[in-house]
């Protein structure tokens, strides 16, 4: 039987072979272009399906191998538990085996007084359970709730993860606004000339542009007792508040309107190009947006941003015979389109995608790093409260709007 590692390596090799076939077939999946397969179109399609089924079968073997590994780990853990001296069964001083005590339920149903109630000679009974050493009357109100101990694990609320900030470069600034020069008129006049002829005259003009530093903040009142009685709660709150700030900033650099005190995100910058999907397949519309960035924007796209629902529709696209274009469902699959990484975030507007050169033509300019402060006013002091406050100041600049293109109508 092959090991889990061997199965994974085998699956990777098979996936690479099928990927090469699809690469030969091109975006339209024209199997007649595939040189590595023989036969007519039906024969080649059958071979593709066979290889896909083969990978699915390997995937099942991988799941079985993983299940065996999980079973081994669980058994090893039980062994460690049972080998712990404090978990071993107690032995009498004489070294002989002690008879296992009856459970409470077994003790009750085998007791003579309980059997008497079955014959209706007794309506109630009281008994003493030797291993607990207390008397009880079996009525519905008897007993007390069991003791519970909190595990210490805390499950945070579901929040949108950070995605867009990871693809945008960041450079600190010490100004209230980021001011830069933008070339507005460019006349390229270079041309061939005859001997003693005039040199053609070019024209270049510049204009000043700027992006104002904006402030993002959040606060949380916390009681003195909460901060003192729960170890680590202050650190947890600090980290949570900082996440709130970064999450807000993550959305602002994409969809902010620019109306004070908001930042202006890429989607609302004047000059960003637009590619309507129209009747095109989504794959084609995205590639056309990439071409706009390359040709009109004279830039090299570095990433694609999509809403999760739009990415789902793309990921589930299949050929007419049911083959998933972006890979077998048994595989994780690369989150890429046309060679570019795809950032999937619900900070993006559903139905709208964005392609751009994030690496070179936009920039986050933080005025101050995220800061956390704890303070109180007179009213807080008398109520035993402290206010934890977190804030940051930053500007966001899109230096070349044509280096970005929106895809609408996805």
Image (tube, helix red, strand yellow):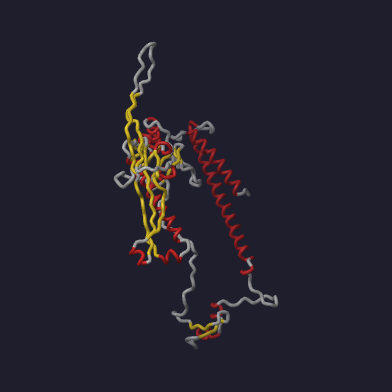
Q: Residue at x 64, y 68 (%)?
A: 85
Q: How many marks?
A: 0
Above or below, 292 against 239 in this view is above
Above or below, 161 against 167 in this view is below
Task: Give the x, y percent position of residue 179.
Answer: 35, 38
Residue 351 appears in view? no
Q: Nearer the viewer, residue 258 or 37?
A: 258
Task: Give the x, y percent position of residue 255.
Answer: 34, 45
Q: Nearer the viewer, residue 330 or 9?
A: 9
Task: Give the x, y percent position of residue 68.
Answer: 59, 55
Left of 179 or right of it: where is 102?
right
Left of 40 or right of it: where is 285?
left
Q: Residue at x 41, y 57 (%)?
A: 157
The quarter of the rendered structure image containing the C terminus is top left
- Outermost residue on the left side: it is 259
Task: Give the x, y percent position of residue 55.
Answer: 54, 44
Residue 141 appears in view? yes
Above or below, 380 against 321 in this view is below
Asked where in the image residue 198 lies, by quadrant, the reply is: top left
């Amino acid at each position: 039987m092959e090991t889990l590692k061997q199965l994974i390596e085998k699956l990777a090799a098979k996936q690479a072979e099928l990927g090469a076939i699809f690469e030969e077939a091109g975006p339209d999946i024209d199997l007649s272009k595939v040189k590595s397969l023989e036969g007519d179109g039906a024969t080649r399609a059958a071979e593709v399906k066979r290889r896909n089924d083969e990978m699915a079968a390997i995937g099942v073997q991988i799941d079985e191998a993983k299940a065996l590994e999980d079973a081994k780990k669980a058994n090893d853990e039980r062994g460690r538990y049972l080998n712990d001296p404090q978990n071993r069964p107690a032995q009498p001083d004489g070294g002989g085996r002690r008879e296992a005590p009856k459970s409470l339920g077994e003790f009750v149903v085998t007791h003579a007084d309980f059997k008497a109630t079955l014959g209706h000679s007794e309506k109630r009974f009281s008994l003493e359970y030797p291993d607990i050493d207390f008397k009880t009357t079996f009525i519905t109100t008897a007993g007390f709730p069991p003791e519970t101990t909190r595990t210490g694990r805390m499950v945070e609320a579901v929040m949108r993860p950070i995605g867009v900030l990871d693809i945008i470069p960041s450079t600190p600034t010490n100004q209230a606004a980021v001011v830069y020069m933008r070339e507005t008129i460019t006349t390229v006049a270079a041309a061939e000339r005859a001997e003693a002829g005039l040199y053609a005259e070019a024209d270049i003009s510049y204009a000043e542009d700027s992006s104002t530093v904006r402030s993002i903040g959040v606060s949380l009142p916390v009681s003195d007792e909460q901060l003192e009685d729960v170890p680590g709660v202050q650190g947890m709150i600090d980290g949570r508040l900082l996440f709130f700030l970064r999450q807000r900033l993550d959305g602002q650099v994409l969809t902010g309107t620019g109306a004070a005190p908001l930042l202006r995100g890429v989607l609302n910058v004047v000059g960003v190009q637009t590619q309507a999907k129209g009747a095109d397949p989504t794959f084609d519309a995205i590639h056309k947006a990439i071409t706009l960035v390359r040709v009109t924007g004279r830039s090299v796209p570095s990433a694609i941003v999509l809403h999760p629902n739009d990415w789902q529709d793309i990921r589930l696209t299949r050929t007419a015979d049911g083959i998933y274009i972006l890979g077998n469902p048994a595989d994780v699959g690369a989150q890429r389109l046309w060679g570019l990484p795809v950032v999937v975030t619900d900070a993006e507007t559903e139905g709208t995608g964005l392609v751009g050169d994030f690496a070179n033509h936009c920039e986050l300019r933080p005025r101050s790093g995220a800061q956390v402060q704890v303070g109180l006013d007179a009213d807080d002091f008398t109520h035993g409260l402290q206010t934890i406050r977190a804030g940051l100041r930053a500007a966001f600049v899109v230096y070349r709007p044509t280096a970005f293109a929106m895809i609408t109508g996805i």
